[in-house]
Image (cartoon, rainbow, N blue to C red):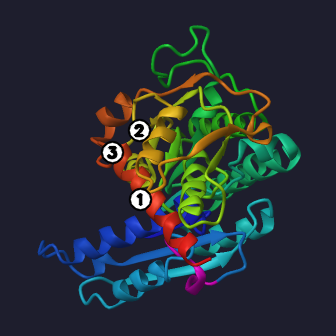
Amino acid sequence: MKTLITGVCGFVGQHLLKLLIDNKCSQANDGSGIGRQDRQEHLLGIDLKQTGVENINIFPGSNRILLDTLKSASLQDKVSFKFEYLQADLTDKKRIDEVISFFKPDRIYHLAGQSSVKYSWANPVETFQTNVFGGIYLLEAMKKYCPDCKMLIVCTAEEYGEAENGNAEAIREEFKINPSNPYAISKASLDFFASTYQKVNNLNIYISRSFNHIGPGQSENFVTSDFARQIAEIEAGLRQPVMHVGNIDVYRDFLDVRDVVRAYECIIQKGRPGQAYNVCSGKKRKISGILDILISFSTQKNISIKVDDIKLRPIDLKIIYGDNSKLKKDTGWESVIDINRSLKDILNWWRERSAQN
């Protein structure tokens, strides 16, 4: 089995890689008697970063957890396992053709892209080039060189925008696409391209519309990680006990990244080609409530809150949360990590970083 992960150095990519490695090693020791040849696994990760596998960590600054995982995986006597890393720009069509024509993957997890809404407002052209053209070049290469491959295109719940009813009910996959920021527009475009390629070319393409995912190792550009970083720095005496926040009166759907990558694996294994799947918790949570939980975990009890204009978005939808019943029905996936564990893990990760400063 040959698997390609785009954006492997990113937050989600590294968690997905760890999941695939852990699963393969677990299968090697399950006593099922499957032959070694059937268990051969070749993983190829590509990313923009100029790095080798020795510099990829499951969480940045985490003592090379991933490298240790890879070393232990290679020592398994019941599984043939190989991981390779390549630097590649998805907007370089020639480079992508070279990679796909040579590797000919059986599965592609397309995670790479520009994922910041804030950045997309300042850089809409770059966002569109990266997310749309990069995705199209990958689809074209799949069609030419590995048409029997299974590919998951990771898109976003931002595509839905806000429904006429104010999203009083959970968003289902059949809801109208109504993007309201450059990032969402770019992902909606890729979503439409992917579904069209699937229909016209009869390819095994699956689409996720992923809601907010969180977890240790996420960039501070995302809300829960930003909150946790500030709290950890307050506890460490690196800043005053004042939390700088954006709009905390909105509702979002948060799912732990470790549940997210399990959902991605379930979709590519058991999903229906051409279908879009909401990857979400199915629960709406107010941002202020998330902040309250994180502060409740803090050793510093006198933290004040200050709204910072620079953290406010030009357009910020009041409620976005999803219905995950289609994902559960088609694949059997269930979430296993609750919000409190996720937030504790995020805060503890930032505490470790703050202690190093």
Query: Quick one: SS at disc 1?
Result: helix
* Magenta stretch encompasses residue 252: no
| Residue 240 seen in this snapshot | yes
Which one is in front, 66 or 187?
66
Residue stretch rendered in magenta on the structure = 52-58
Q: Mark 2 against mark 3, which lies toward the viewer?
A: 3
354 on left or right of 301: right
| Three-letter code for the amino acid on which mark 3 is drawn | Asp
* Magenta stretch encompasses residue 54: yes
Which one is in front, 331 or 50?
50
179 on left or right of 170: right
Q: Is residue 67 above or below residue 235?
A: below
Name the residue beneath numbered marker 3.
338
Residue 91 picture location, percent across and down: 79, 59
Query: Quick one: SS at disc 2?
Result: loop
Residue neighbourhood size for the residue with mark 3, other residues' Cα within 10 Å, grouped as few (<14), some (14–19), many (≥20): few
Name the residue beneath numbered marker 2.
272
Q: Mark 2 against mark 1, which lies toward the viewer?
A: 1
| Alpha-carbon span between mark 3 and mark 1 | 11 Å
Q: Is residue 286 above or below residue 193?
A: above
Q: For residue 192, which quarter of the picture? A: top right
111 on left or right of 283: right
Query: Quick one: SS at disc 3?
Result: loop
Question: Mark 2 touching mark 3, by CB under 8 A?
Answer: no
Q: Earlier in the sequence, mark 2 or mark 1?
A: 2
Quarter that holds the N terminus:
bottom left
Name the residue beneath numbered marker 1.
345
| Three-letter code for the amino acid on which mark 1 is drawn | Asp
Residue 327 picture location, percent across and down: 37, 36
Residue 29 picture location, percent across and down: 18, 77
